[in-house]
Image (tube, coloured by chain):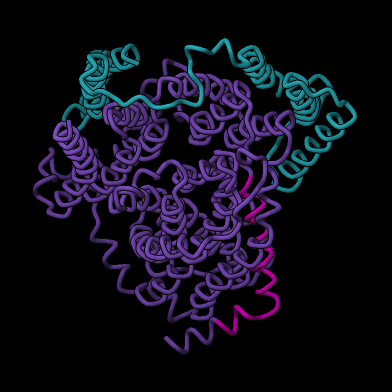
Chain colours: A purple, B cyan
Amino acid sequence: MLEGILIGLQTAFSVQNLLMVIAGCLIGTFIGMLPGLGPMSIIAIMIPVVLSMGDPSAALILLAGVYYGAIFGGSTSSILLNAPGVAGTVASSFDGYPMARQGKAGKALTIAAIASFAGGTLGAILLMIFAPVLSSVALLFHSAEYFALMVVGLSAIAAFAGTGQVAKAIIMTLLGLIMATVGEGALFNLPRFTMGIMDLQSGFGFITLAMAMFALPEALFLVLKPRNLQGDDGAIKDLRITRSEAKAIAPVIGRQSVQGFFIGVLPGAGATIASFLGYAVERNIAPKEQKKEFGKGSVKGLAAPESANNAACTGSFVPLLTLGIPGSGTTAILLGALIALNVTPGPRLMIDAPQIFWAVIMSMFIGNFVLLILNLPLIPYIAKVLTIPHNYLIPFILFFTLMGAYIGQNNATELLILVGFGVCATALKFADYPLAPLLIGFILGGMMEDNFSRSMQLYDGVSFIWERPMTLCLLMIAVLLVLIPGYRERRAITRSRANSDGHF
Amino acid sequence: MLGICLVYGYTAWFTMDANLAPFMRRNPVWPSSFPKVLSTVSILVLFFILLGVERSEQKEKDIDYRRLHEYHLGQAMVILGLMITYALCLRPFGFLFSTTAFLIAGSFILGERKWHIMVPVSLTTTVLVWYLIQQILGIYLRPLPGFSGS
């Protein structure tokens, strides 16, 4: 392994490849900030550029830099504008945006940058150590386990179910799942619930829904009741993390980097589930007083999904590099680029082309480091976006929201759907319905139904639930993740009532 | 919401399976299976909410919808109208004109009157975004109105 690391270092530290990492990180960060352009689209756009380079190591290094940059860029729009451009950064807006509203946009971006760096770096270390072993473990996961894993991912909704909100959070999740069934399913190839509208054949777009649920209602609220986006006193403050905050987020980053990496290794699971699950787990294990902070600007609530999604992105390289199986859409495009460059990823890649395998891993370290170095000084300037006067900022937010939905599908109907959903989402927000569970349900719904149907076909019924111990175990964890917070809260209320009765 | 779930449930339970191919009927899972489960559970949860079984705590809200008239409701409605107009104009009038007009009109509706800032800022942003998306990233956005033949 040591020899491999040295080969990787030698390749990655050449001037050309260092420039590639820097260029990749910058391109990824700036384009990733535009809602609607996630890592997948940016990498796809970059493929003609890398193919013209000819050198597979340099090409992969550039693409890895773009990948990491795009993920960080996506978090930026999520935190500053509540406009998550990719599913993996949705969970970052749960606490990142409330922090930005409190005038802590700079701090939120700093936490995101550090958590991303730590997640990516720890992920790369784990990739280096466990890659060959994990590739065989990942294959043990069947569709039944994937279905159960999606259900565990849905348990993140518990985080939004405050007192008396459980039913509302559940119905919003169910609405998200219902919306995911619109259009042609992968398994049946039958249009469902399209009402004969051709534009709905491929279902609702994720970006459209994400913008309609998060960015549009927020912009409309700003129009209805103008307030300072950069905090009550109008200043961007608290750029640095305090010692106590660093102490609080360090174990979160450690835990979520490991958990995120292992979820990322599973083909199909990826950064989205890792981030939701990371958020749910951290909320459940947080002490009572810190738990209340989740959703209102908790540093832990931001650090958890950020480190988890970055580690998961690194984890998704395990099946790609060791088995040649792309674990996510982005790695599928990377696989295409590799094949076009005459590199065939698989068990023999480490032996036949060690310089490529190890250079990619080393470039992950360098990419993460470069991203941190480049972004930390830029954070005060990026956060300054929020100081733009409302009269200019709101039309710009609305424009980028509309553009995000438009460039994904190149269809103006998508914009009308976005406005329609945005109005519905605003009405639901008035009625105090949490919107995040709807989006979580929508994102996981399609994958969940596909895996459920596949398991049903394989086992000729629902017997897969008790015939596969890992499935049963995961489903039980999901039930516990949803029920325990509610039970604890109810018990606390009963106790406080008993105490107050005792006093009077 | 209950209406949506009832219509969804009706479609799943009574209309979807009518045209199902015979070989698919032998499958343990049908295209309507998952929607059937979802509709049933949704309707049950909605009744649970409507009957007020679960009591939620009173929270201080950002905006109280009962006092909506006290906020800038007119501006919000006009902005929504502007977004719909933009969606309808994007293709026929081209990206450059529609977007510049959208940004200027948006700022104007929100009370901005500094035309010397509004116009150059909107125009520069539009051209920059168009250049980035179409020229660099290669995603086609019709720049000029359709009738100009572009």
Q: Is residue A253 left or right of residue B150?
A: left
- Residue A261 lies, with reference to residue A328, above or below; the image says below
In terms of image quadrants, where is residue A429?
top left
- Residue B137 lies, with reference to residue B142, above or below; the image says below
> Which secondary structure type mostly characterizes the magenta part of the structure?
helix
Name the residue furthest front: A504
**Magenta-span inclusion, residue A24:** yes
Estimate the x, y position of residue A190 in percent, counting from the top left.
Answer: 35, 27
Who is closer to the viewer here, B68 or A472? Answer: B68
Q: Residue at x 63, y 23 (%)?
A: A223
Who is closer to the viewer here, A426 or A295? Answer: A295
In terms of image quadrants, where is residue B87?
top right
Who is closer to the viewer here, A342 or A258? Answer: A258
Q: Residue at x 43, y 26 (%)?
A: B60
Q: Residue at x 52, y 36 (%)?
A: A207
Estimate the x, y position of residue A28 in percent, counting from the top left.
Answer: 63, 56
Q: Residue at x 32, y 38 (%)?
A: A157
Magenta segment: A9-33
Position of the N terminus of chain A, as image quadrant, is: bottom left
Who is closer to the viewer here, A201 or A17? Answer: A17
Is residue A143 at least partly visible in the picture? Answer: yes
